[in-house]
Image (tube, rainbow, N blue to C red):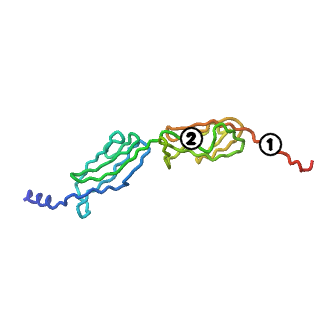
Amino acid sequence: MLIALVALLTGCTPAPASIKLDGEAAVSVHSTDPLPLEKASVLDASGNAVEGQVPVWTVTPENVAKLEGENLVPLANGEATVTATLGDIKAEYKVTVALPDKVALTGYNPGDAWTVGETKTLTGQVFSGETALEKLPVTWASDNTAVLTVTEAGEATAASEGAAKLTVSHGALATTVDVTVTAAAPATADAAAPQ
């Protein structure tokens, strides 16, 4: 009786027809931090979920990213295809790995002297090769805040005469420039003013 019931229930299980991924078709990553695999749902021909069916994940090429449990670990710059497979059906998405390798500083020409009280708006840009990576945060620092101060937004102000090193960084990447601050030029007397 039990065997007949199991056979009956097995025969009524809908056949898997497709795999639906809950995520973007293309993903860009800029670090080697593990990221969760997209959620995969197995569906029947009517689009209903088929319970108890678990697809197998693979990633190619393995020199760009690798699988660790339920996570994908980026390894090197390039494009990888992540695939969920169950029998003859599969679904996949692309992962582009672009690891940062330098930080550039704009808004200041090295060698230019600043005058006391002068403020410059600086910009830090993270790159992977020649490609600018948007929306990656940078951190600003001055090694001599008595001479030069800088805000988190990159507003640098010359506070007094002297020298300072200004650094913009992203993680372990950093660019440092030397800043020299000179006294502001004295105001010239108005020749037409009464003596």
Q: Quadrant of residue 117?
A: top right
The amino acid on which the numbered mark 2 sits, given as a three-letter code, is Val
Q: Quadrant of residue 45?
A: bottom left
Q: Which residue is mark 2?
A: 168
How packed mark 2 is, by other alpha carbons closer than 10 Å (few <14, some 14-19, many 20 or more), is: many
Residue at disc 1, secondary structure:
loop
Q: Residue furthest bottom?
A: 46
Q: Residue furthest left?
A: 1
Q: Earlier in the sequence, mark 2 or mark 1?
A: 2
Q: Which residue is located at x 25 percent, y 62 percent?
A: 48
Residue 84 placed where, x, y %?
28, 50
The amino acid on which the numbered mark 1 sits, given as a three-letter code, is Pro
Side of 105 relative to 28 (left or right): right
**Nearer to the camera, 164 or 133:** 133
Quadrant, the N terminus: bottom left
Residue 23 placed where, x, y %?
36, 55
Q: Which residue is mark 1?
A: 186
Residue 93 placed where, x, y %?
34, 51
Residue 17 vertical placement versus 63 (above, below):
below
Residue at disc 2, secondary structure:
strand
**Nearer to the camera, 45 or 36:** 45
Q: How many marks?
A: 2
Q: Which residue is located at x 75 percent, y 39 percent?
A: 183
Residue 31 numbered mark, or none: none
